[in-house]
Amino acid sequence: MKSSKRPPIKRREALVPYSRDHHHGLLLVWKVRQGLKKGAAPERIAAYVHHFYSQHLLPHFTEEENHLFIALDQGGAMLQEALDDHAYLGQKAQELASTPSENSLTLFADRLERHIRFEERVLFQHLQEVMPTEMPADYQGNIPDDDDWPDAFWLDAAAPEKLRIDPASLEWIPGKVNSFYGKELLNQPHATFKLVKAGPMSSYPRHTHPDRTEFVYVLEGTPLFEIGGETFTAKPHEFYLFPAQIPHAIVNDHPDPAIMLVGGFFVNAPAP
């Protein structure tokens, strides 16, 4: 019996960062729909949508139009559909900034999802055939770093009135890196706290936070932590500190997931 699953798509190197951006775009769609499902006020959701659009979607659209779409037939239907989607989403983002509503949020999320599916399944497939082989892969992607967004409306886990949270009742949410998932327990302007699951044979690339110190308490597994120039093989019930401005990475090179409590706070946070 033939499998109904779609075969994995092998992307040209120049297209990979754009597809990675699409993953985060679909995560935005999920957040909007979750917020609406939970009854979050449209103003809360729209504030995040406007932030995400201006900081991530608009730069992504600009890169596509300036560097990818030049390989398309300039009078073709595929190019026109993509440009129409870009214009519509920009118009909706501006509309949400001034007059947020559940209907506009739904229209924005539906159109963004449809646009991403179109690009991944149709437009990018065509680009792989018509792009010049020497086309440079200069664009590195525009991965959001929204860990400190103060209002997790899609979870409502940080609402001040919630004094007790049952992590077992929360869903594992895909993170910005493949095979990493989170359950957000606290998201305040100056501090965050979450459960993090690193999938089997996964790694979180080396990175730094200029003004935030993070800490990790290992619950399950034996992940490797690279902190500065040192590598540690962590064990359950051990605690580690990732100081601000120090490069760090997480590697789980085992066939089982690693579960950690991960928190962070701004080292120069202003007084409330």
Image (cartoon, grey):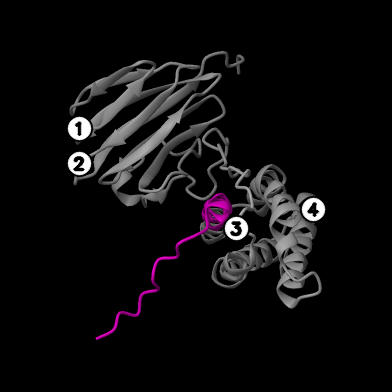
How far separated are the C-alphas under marks 1 and 3?
A: 42 Å
Graded by Cα atoms within 10 Å as few (under 14), some (14 to 19) or many (20 or more), the crowding at tag 4 reads some
What amino acid type should be assigned to the residue bearing mark 2? His
Decide if residue 229 is in sight here.
yes
Q: Residue furthest front?
A: 134
**Quarter of the image with the N terminus in it:** bottom left
Write down the residue under mark 3: 133
Q: Residue at image x 71%, y 46%?
A: 59
Graded by Cα atoms within 10 Å as few (under 14), some (14 to 19) or many (20 or more), the crowding at tag 2 reads some
**Nearer to the camera, 153 or 81:** 81
Q: Residue at image x 30%, y 79%?
A: 3
Q: Residue at image x 49%, y 24%?
A: 208
What's the mark number on residue 222?
A: 1
Whether residue 12 appears in magenta in the rendering, the answer is: yes
Q: Where are the magenta residues, as a range?
A: 1-26
How far separated are the C-alphas under marks 2 and 1?
A: 8 Å
Q: Where residue 257 sits: x, y (%)? A: 24, 44
Q: Earlier in the sequence, mark 4 or mark 3?
A: 4
Q: Earlier in the sequence, mark 4 or mark 1?
A: 4
Q: Where residue 170 sits: x, y (%)? A: 36, 50
Write down the residue under mark 2: 254
How far separated are the C-alphas under marks 4 and 3?
A: 37 Å
Location of residue 204 with respect to 103 vertically, above or below: above
**Quarter of the image with the C terminus in it:** top right
Q: Residue at image x 49%, y 46%?
A: 156
> Where, by quadrant of the figure, is residue 96 drawn?
bottom right
